[in-house]
Image: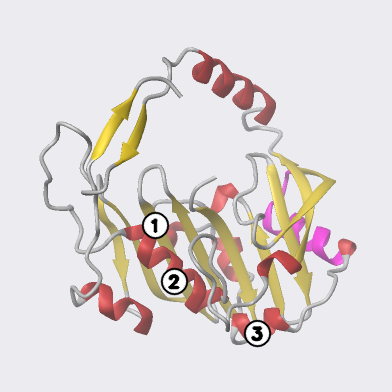
Amino acid sequence: MGAKTGLLVYADGDVPGLLRGVRAADLDRTATMVGRLRPGCEIETCGGSNLGDGVYPPKGTVYAASWPGVEVIGDQSVMIDAPSQLPEHVVAASAGRRLVLHAMHSVVDWLAFAVWEDGRLVRSLSLSPDSGIIENIGEPLPFEQPYWAGDRPADIVPWPGEEEEPYPLPFHPLDLGEDALRALCGFVVEGRPDPDDIDADAIKLHGFRVRDPYGPDPAEQEAALRRAVEAMGPPRVYTLGPDGSLTERDGL
């Protein structure tokens, strides 16, 4: 899957601390929350997931759980370039509590995260190597400091036949993305978990199929994607050499 997230968390306080105390989430309570966040959509239950895997559900699917004090939603629709443009009703639901958005996509090295307190945006960052800094609102949070100080530069291996060029950003977005996810939510999706991380795989999320009656059909989108993949050429496979260089192999 790679490092991909589309995650919202509402919380009455510290998210990691609250998630450590949760048990099985009530289905009806969770369905009501999903309906509130996706008004006008057709919603039906489907197979669920867990917090470790459910942060990037398929299009048209939402994985979610609602407990007293904390609510979690995995939904690709929150993966927006500018977190400050999150729909007004989604932000309004955070009145009196904290809202965290975390979104990243490893294919394009894109990261976006944001924090609202009582409905007020206090920090938003969105960036990728191709687009640069898309949004940068508020003061950097403590976990960001080493990255902006130049202590965590990107370690990039160039493709064969290409000269090594300076990375367009002072750090790799996905590295910051994992630290942001740990600091804000208490877990990571890739890399080695810390002893203090929550066990995200043990937190179960309910599944919902969500369809906008005026939007594209997810099944048609998936079929179009499969056709595009079938039209692609054979994969190119590379081996990482002892000197750190990449060498193309013949076939798989």
Neighbours of disc 3 within 10 Å: few (<14), some (14-19), many (20+): some
Residue type beneath disc 3 = Asp
Q: Position of residue 201 (x, y in %)?
A: 70, 64
Q: Taking 209 as reference, is 171 left or right? A: left
Label the magenta part by its dominant secondary structure: helix
Q: Taking 61 as reference, is 82 left or right? A: left
Q: Position of residue 223 (x, y in %)?
A: 63, 20
Residue 148 seen in the current view: yes
Query: What is the C-alpha distance between the residues marked 2 and 1?
Result: 10 Å
Segment colored magenta? 29-41
Q: Residue at x 35, y 84 (%)?
A: 142
Residue identifier under label 2: 180
Q: Are marks 2 and 1 in contact (CB under 8 Å)?
A: yes
Q: Residue at x 19, y 63 (%)?
A: 170
Q: Taking 27 as reference, is 243 left or right? A: left
- Residue 12: mark: 3
Q: Residue at x 50, y 63 (%)?
A: 102
Q: Is residue 31 magenta?
A: yes
- Residue 111: mark: 1
Residue type beneath disc 1 = Leu
